[in-house]
Image (spheres, rainbow, N blue to C red):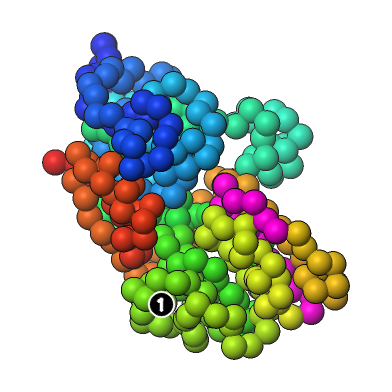
Amino acid sequence: MTVPPSPVVTSAWVVEHPVPIASAPLRFVERETSAPGPSELLLRVRTCGVCRTDLHLAEGDLAPHRPRCTPGHEVVGEVIAAGSAVQNFRVGDRAGAAWLAETCGQCHYCRTGRENLCPDSRYTGWDIHGGFADYMVVDARFAYVLPDGWGDEEAAPLLCAGIIGYRALQRADLPRGGRLGIYGFGASAHLTAQLAIARGAEVHVVTRSPPAQRLALELGAASAGEGAPPRPLDAAILFAPAGRLVPAALEALDRGGTLAIAGIHLSAMPPLDYDQHLFQERTVRSVTANTREDGRAFLAEAARLRPTVRVTRYPMRRADQALEDLAVGRVTGVAVLVTS
């Protein structure tokens, strides 16, 4: 495998100054991408999904970890070069780069199968430059082999929307054949709903968006609307980053139900009433990133089930528009950036 002797110049978006998306926090620039190290891959980006986490980073809901960092962590790319220690990819292969970019491998969490909790974890598009660019570098140990038969635009959302939805579903402890409530119906939710339905669940979606309601019903949800689900829920997942929805989601749970909060950022929650919201062994759980095993397990399940991925396509040079559309609810399904 040939490693280029000098850095590659790439066109890329960077977060210049985190501000509300309407104030244009992103800039399109030319910068250098380093040659890959011994365990790294240099990817030519083909597609990159647009995640709400990218919006949180651009707007400053998440504090910057790296000045002028390039967002994007749902990346499908072609391997252009690989380091001397890489064994699982060759030049010309297709590879997926996801949110989790690096862990220490030595701490208690890493050694007990919980690398998503590693205190020294690093993330694509937050700690290292991500996929809103023509080229990027990724650690091959954290890259994914993508299922055959998926186009680049379909595959990109699997790498975060799909994986984090998979972990959220695991954290929600949904019993087989149970009733699942989904609050918010964007990129991750529309994949998670299909996964749950394929496992035999009855899914009820709560969203204000009429297009999202229609999509939920089209994908097999038992109900979709703004109000409370029509039946008590065995489990629920909150995808919308709105803390005000937590009490309502808990009230909708049956006895012993679990609410998993899937977002990396959540607005302030109102006070909870113990008797109304938590008594009868209702549980609230957060979801923090994912392990690589989560990623591999989800991609294997997705390869079998072939969920529908509803994509809204944007050229890479319109990443700022894609984020603005996401912020105001103009994206149904998932936005995907495509390089020329």
In the picture, which quadrant includes the C terminus? top left
Query: Residue 321 appears at what percent x and percent y?
Result: 26, 46
Residue 261 is one of the magenta-drawn residues: yes
Identify residue for label 1.
213
Magenta part of the chain: 255-270
From the viewer's perspective, is 111 left or right of 296? right
Q: Which residue is drawn at 63% across and 88% down?
A: 231
From the viewer's perspective, is 126 left or right of 146? right
Q: In this view, does 259 lie above or below 133?
A: below
Residue 39 is one of the magenta-drawn residues: no
Query: Residue 260 appears at what percent x and percent y?
Result: 65, 62
Q: Which of 269 and 205 is in front in this view?
A: 269
Q: Which of 10 and 333 is in front in this view?
A: 333
In the picture, which quadrant includes the N terminus? top left
Q: Residue at x 66, y 71 (%)?
A: 248
Q: Residue at x 66, y 64 (%)?
A: 246
Q: Which of 311 and 108 is in front in this view?
A: 311
Name the quadrant containing residue 190. Answer: bottom left
Q: How many marks?
A: 1
Asked whether the viewer can see residue 87, the reply is: no
